[in-house]
Image (cartoon, grey):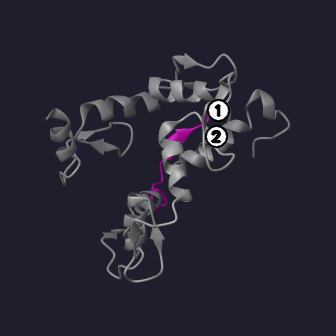
Amino acid sequence: KSNFKIHLLTHKATKDLKCTQCDYATNNKFYLKTHLLRHNSLKDLKCDNCDYETNIKYNFKKHQLTHSKTGKHLKCAHCDFATNHKSILREHLQTHKTTRDFKCSLCDHATNNKSSFKIHLLTHRTAKDLKCTQCDFATNFKSHFKTHLLTHKTVKDLKCSQCDYATNYRSNFNKHLLTHSKTAKYLKCA
């Protein structure tokens, strides 16, 4: 019953709980608490086998599986694929199904993955629901829209503590941090 109430909050148009350090917003206290850990520069959980650090226990446990001495213990019965994550194996097994559960009525696209099918359907929509107020950019994809909004942001939220590099793109920032890692001393900061 409480899980259903939490789920209903995802459909609420306004997000009442907001991060004070970025534009993240949610209606779930736990999600906000977990999100706030990402802004904490001091990482409490450090991997003994590599440079990985985090404040999020779930991410840390998931990372530790990558160093598993027994190797990847969940194996596909149809091919050589192996993983330590049940959800990833479940998703992989869908690739071996000969019938497709979700078929597009507008083209030949077919899949067994419901979320990827929903995303595919958006490609056929001519009306774009998400419109930028600062330029003529429009899309139906939330992730594309969020990334686009960063192009208008003048203040860079992600700043390197070891040099003057700054960006608003998490993936670029993570790639940059590798230039300072122990294993990549041959890479020079631009």
* Residue in the picture at 68% in, 23% down: 70
- Residue 157 on the magenta segment: yes
Q: 10 Å neighbourhood of mark 1: few (<14), some, or many (≥20)?
A: some
Q: In the picture shown, does residue 35 fall above or below 78?
A: above
Magenta segment, principal secondary structure? Answer: loop
- Residue 89 on the magenta segment: no
Q: Quadrant of the N terminus?
A: top left
User: Of the residues under marks 2 and 1, which one precedes in the sequence?
Assistant: 1
Q: How far is disc 2 from disc 1 in space, using C-alphas?
A: 6 Å
Q: 10 Å neighbourhood of mark 2: few (<14), some, or many (≥20)?
A: some
Q: Secondary structure at mark 1?
A: loop
Report which residue position mark 2 lands on. 82
Q: Is residue 71 left or right of residue 65?
A: right
Report which residue position mark 1 lands on. 72
* Residue in the picture at 33% in, 70% down: 131
User: In the drawing, what numbered circle is on residue 6?
Assistant: none
Marks 2 and 1 in Cβ contact (< 8 Å): yes
Amino acid type at mark 2: Ala
User: In the depicted view, which residue is nearer to us: 63 or 53?
Assistant: 63
Q: Secondary structure at mark 2?
A: strand
User: In the depicted view, which residue is nearer to us: 86 or 16?
Assistant: 86
